[in-house]
Image (spheres, rainbow, N blue to C red):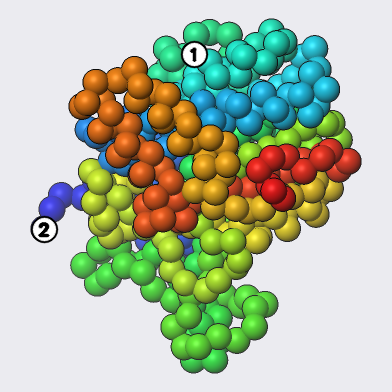
Amino acid sequence: MKKPTPLESLIVAIIREDGPMPLDRYMALCLGHPLYGYYMSRDPFGPDGDFVTAPEISQIFGELVGIWCAAAFQALEAPRSFNLIELGPGRGTLMSDILRAARVMPGFAAAAQIHLVETSPTLRKLQARNLGEAVTWHEAIDGIPEGPSIIIANEFFDALPIRQHEFHQGQWMERRVGLSADDRLVIGRTAFPLAAPPAPEGAILETGTLRDDIAQVLGARLAKSPGTALVFDYGHAASALGDTLQAVRRHEFCSILDRPGEADLTAHVDFQSMGRAFTQSGAVIHGPITQRRFLLAMGLEARAALLSQKANPAERKIIARATERLAGENQMGNLFKVMAATSPGLATPYPFGS
Ligand code: SAH
């Protein structure tokens, strides 16, 4: 038997003390424990890491988002100062590509006050290296000053914890992490009533209270001051039953219980639930549409063609492969969705509603 990770020993001790652990607590510890959490001590992105995100695949992704931000800035009537907020900025690549592309819009760069919501000290350091010191970091959105804002999130919500419920013998129970006879982590069912319609035996329902809470806080910000938010993530447009919690280590799926703290844990985003949270606090939502539709409408192919003109054959191949990865039907194109939220009274942002 492999030696448990330090976090595994800690989780075993907590379960012995408190009983089976809800998955949201487990996920939060695995990702965010100050010493042993997955994001806390490492740079997980890129070929040598565990997974690759859209901005790390190609600069084109961030450039197109930058053009979108430039248009959003115009829709806000080019304020003299506004908050450009990114949630979970990873290496800072997306923000740096956004800023480069949005420079074409007069006034944008001078007006943008950059606020990053990031819990990981390691990633904050990388972000500082990529973006310079003219940015402000926050543990949570609450700390960001009021005022007009453009808010971006890519693969942020999928990293926020969820709970899982299972329909078993005529009632909903909760799936929790417990201990086997030999003190290994196992998933079990705990009686925990949930007000949801009955479902087939074994059906799994996921709830993301923290995700919805954050969408609600963002929505309240948009209801109070003019602004717009753009959220990219993999997930489903309509709420659906099913187990989407997954662990990835070194580009391979593994069990969510395997080596806690050493694998990335994520679960699909329920865009219907997120949309409801945005609307409840007074924002207006647009979409979701697929990432494919968004990127193609924003000019993915034209931008790729332009970059290819200046490239050698090997680089051209890389550009073509990246474009296909970002927008291909069977790659990220359809799995990833994009949703916008705006202050009431603002026009529907392109390409939503087009
Ligand atoms: N947007 C980046 C990184 C996605 S990974 C990209 O596309 O490459 C998730 C990011 O969210 C990481 O930066 C991680 O440290 C951060 N994060 C995870 N949970 C968080 C939380 N609760 N609060 C703030 N940031 C969080």
Ligand 1: does it lie within 8 Å of the C-beta at label 1?
no
- Single out the mark in the foreground, 1 or 2: 1
- In the image, taking residue 195 as reference, residue 249 lies left or right, namely left
Q: Tell me the kind of residue under disc 1.
A: Leu
Q: Which residue is drawn at 80% across and 46% down?
A: 283
- In the image, taking residue 329 as reference, residue 134 lies left or right, namely right
204 or 150: nearer the viewer: 150
Q: Name the residue under label 1.
A: 131
Query: Whole-percent x and y of residue 191?
Result: 53, 78
Query: Whole-percent x and y of residue 218?
Result: 72, 40
Q: Is residue 7 among the parts visible in the rendering?
A: no
Q: Name the residue under label 2.
A: 1
How many tags in the picture?
Answer: 2
Give the spatial CA distance, label 1 vs label 2: 44 Å
For this orientation, the residue located farthest to the bottom is 170
Query: Whole-percent x and y of residue 73?
Result: 73, 24
